[in-house]
Image (cartoon, rainbow, N blue to C red):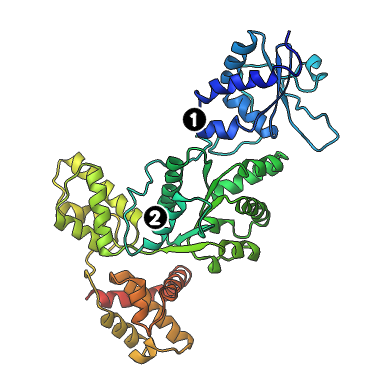
Amino acid sequence: MHKMTKDHTSVWNNCIKVIEGLVSPQSFKTWFQPIQPVRLEGQALTIQVPNKFFYEWLEEHYVHILQKTLQEELGPNARLEYLIPRKTTAPAAYKGPTLSKDLEKNYGQVPLRTEKIKNPFVIPGIKKVKVDSQLNSEYTFDSFVEGDCNQLARSAGWAVAKRPGQTAFNPLMIFGNVGLGKTHLAHAIGNEVLNGFSDKTVLYVSSERFTNQFIEALRSNAISDFVNFYQLVDLLIVDDIQFLANKQKTQDIFFHIFNHLHQKGKQLILTSDRPPKELQGMEERLISRFKWGLSADLQVPSLETRMAIIQQKMENDGVDLAHDVAEYISHNVRTNVRELEGILVSLIAQAALNRREIDISLAREVISNFVEDITTPKEVSVEQIQEIVAKHYSLSLEDLTGKSRKRYIVIARKLSMYLMKQYSDMSLKNIGLAFGGRDHTTVMHACRSIEDMLNEKPQFRQVVEQIQEKLRR
């Protein structure tokens, strides 16, 4: 007969020594290290777990391991009981959903069982994949091509990966337009942390998934479990944070999670399609915290960077691509890396299916399915764009590059910047210099304003199409 206080610690220590060799280091740290043995009565071992969600996760994912190890220690009739501390007037121990009336009297004697328990606090995505990261293992620093367009963000990300939570870059916000590699870089940081710090718990989550989890937690009356879960994380990566806009309650809960992690020296990484100061529908207290660390932007890759991306992608796929074909693709696909990679995948598939050589002719056919017009000149000069836009708006070059804030001049100036970004390989910094020494953030804002006008004003779109037609001649 086991004594109540004599052997519960040694029994549990023996169990977790075995368990440690059966699960990943991340899972062991997250789900077994926080457990405390409480007492041993006969063949019933009582353990204390942090919360109800913790208990449910153990029962759903690790019941077989617990059963095997405990039976080896205490015999075939071993039982495991859970104790969940609660600040309520209810009994402290959790009553399992399938308890018999006799067991209910003992406040939580939950026999080991093999059937799965439906988890009332469902975290979409986590239930079916590893809880320790949800990272894409293919997104690494090795597969991330560095260039002038992303050098600051990449360097900051590498520093964070080597010293998570210990640099001035906390939070690290990576922002830029769609398809420029924000998600790739965020995953790369997470994967590097996992490789270098086996004791760190890393979690990637999109803002949409975070919101859905929060809604489910509200519905299930499990907010404390939701918060406790996120507070276990050492590195939290939240993708597309801009989608929390105008979601007041979700922002409130994220604010508290952010504060807790930051105060504990945990690392936060956020991605967005715009810098913090341009986030609309977001609480000011959140925006101020986003500015605590470093905001690093990703720009459209230059011609040289696009060439490097193409060569790396093709080498990884075992394809020998001629230099002139790579150059042709680089000149005609300028929008973002995602579109570029999609074209390369289609190019390889077409060559394989049709048994054709990958040449400029095949590249032109594939690109025509993605790009509306591939007859655009390879390069349009600054002077050409400024001259055509100024003439269209009846302005002088001095008006276009000067400081006037008249609305029609501002629109013409922004449109010129937008067209330079579309029709040349100039960096944002150099485009700004061509307009009286403005900085690259001004150019980014100008391009975004024009894109909004193109989406919202059909008449303006017609004007831009007319100017583009002149540039093609």
Q: Is residue 449 above or below residue 198?
A: below
Q: On the image, which quarter does residue 419 sit in?
A: bottom left
Q: Are marks 1 and 2 in contact (CB under 8 Å)?
A: no
Q: Is residue 429 above or below residue 31?
A: below
Neighbourhood count class around disc 2 (C-alpha, 10 Å): few under 14, some 14–19, many 20 upward? many
Residue at coordinates 61% horizontally, 36% vertically from top-left?
Answer: 122
Foreground of the two, 138 or 396? 138
The label shown at residue 145 is none
Three-letter code for the amino acid on which mark 2 is drawn: Gly
The label nearer to you, 1 versus 2, is: 1
Q: Quadrant of the N terminus?
A: top right
Three-letter code for the amino acid on which mark 1 is drawn: Ser
Question: Is residue 464 in view from this perspective?
Answer: no
Residue at coordinates 29% horizontally, 80% vertically from top-left?
Answer: 385
* Place of residue 431 in the rendered image (x, y in percent of width and height, measured from the top left): 34, 76
User: Mark 2 highlights which residue?
Assistant: 181
Question: Is residue 216 in view from this perspective?
Answer: yes
Foreground of the two, 472 or 114? 114
* Place of residue 7 in the rendered image (x, y in percent of width and height, measured from the top left): 69, 17
Precedes in sequence: disc 1 or disc 2? 1
Q: Please, what secondary structure does the residue beneath circle 2 have?
A: loop
Q: Residue furthest right?
A: 89
Q: How many marks?
A: 2
User: Mark 1 highlights which residue?
Assistant: 24
* Place of residue 443 in the rendered image (x, y in percent of width and height, measured from the top left): 41, 74
Q: Is residue 289 left or right of residue 79?
A: left
Foreground of the two, 305 or 70? 70
* Place of residue 368 in the rendered image (x, y in percent of width and height, measured from the top left): 25, 57
Residue at coordinates 59% horizontally, 56% vertically from top-left?
Answer: 244
